[in-house]
Image (spheres, rainbow, N blue to C red):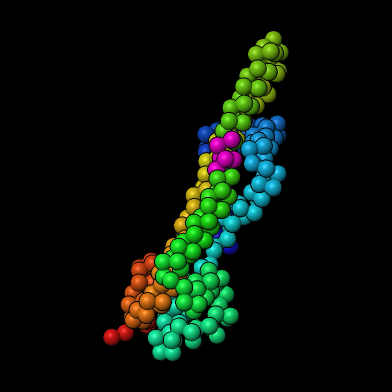
Amino acid sequence: MDISTIIGIGGAFGMVVFSVLVGGGNILGIIDLPSFLMVVLGSYFALITSTSLAGGLGIWGIIGRTFNIPVFNEQSIIQKMMSFSEKARREGLLALEDELEDLDDEFMKKGLRLVVDGTDAEIIRSLMELELSQMQGRHADKIGTVNQWAALAPGLGMLGTVVGLIGMLQNLEDKAAIGPNMALALVTTLYGSMVANLLMIPFVMKLRSQDSRESMVKEMIIEGVLSIQAGDNTRILAMKLLAYLNPQDRRTLEAELIKD
């Protein structure tokens, strides 16, 4: 569970409520069901129109990813790569074949399978980078769906503002209707801004961060696979792969993996 997502959402909405109360307002004044329905559900159905029914329903799973911390096991990957490198240099590339079935990482398994089969290095790089680019494309489509919701919500908020103003102008002689219509006019704008800026845009940024990290791990695997095929010294391989880690994780492994 990614606690930062929960803290961020709770803190952001909490600050809105706190600001209303500190400013002398009433929290019930910003709670309006018609405004909620128009902005949240209205923008959601507009999203379905812009994508598809499957895309609209699937967005909840995409958003759910922001509440989980993805585990890519970079350190474990480096250790496995070094083990494969040592075995390949000692016994030959064909000796890796028996080790492949135990691999959990399908991307690494495919790359090493190509190495064992004697595939040219350029072809291996091309195939693995193609798979990486296709993954990035799929991620971009999913992130784009969330980004579309962020773009639609403020527009629905402005639409609610117009509806509220129309209702108010049509009933200027009814003083009792001015307040509710003005509330609808203003609260819908607030809801549109909150959906976009407190939820969807932060979700997009977190999803992009996760995509960037997963892409980095796959780039590291490509580098490791090609290094094993080239017969690089295990120490050189370790230095290449450690370059992909953040400084803290790198220092943790360097003393253990790179020895004089």
Q: Position of residue 176 (x, y in %)?
A: 71, 18
From the viewer's perspective, is residue 217 above or below residue 77?
A: above
Location of the N terminus by quadrant is: bottom right
Q: Position of residue 171 (x, y in %)?
A: 70, 13
Examine the rendering and report whether any part of residue 190 can be seen.
Answer: no
Residue found 44% across the figure and 78% down from its top: 81
In the picture as drawn, the residue positioned furthest to the top comes out as: 173
From the viewer's perspective, is residue 226 above or below residue 90?
A: above
Q: Quadrant of residue 122?
A: bottom left
Left or right of 239? Residue 192 is right
From the viewer's perspective, is residue 136 above or below residue 224?
A: above
Left or right of 58? Residue 112 is left
Q: Is residue 147 magenta?
A: yes
Q: Which residues are magenta?
A: 146-152
Q: Quadrant of residue 67?
A: bottom right
Frontmost residue, 90 versus 122: 122
In the picture as drawn, the residue positioned furthest to the bottom comes out as: 91
From the viewer's perspective, is residue 38 above or below residue 213?
A: above
Q: Position of residue 216 (x, y in %)?
A: 44, 62
Q: Is residue 259 magenta?
A: no
Magenta stretch: dominant SS? helix
Residue found 59% across the figure and 36% down from its top: 153
Examine the rendering and report whether any part of residue 24 can be seen.
Answer: yes
Q: Position of residue 33 (x, y in %)?
A: 70, 34
Residue found 65% across the figure and 17% down from its top: 166
Frontmost residue, 193 versus 127: 127
Location of the C terminus by quadrant is: bottom left
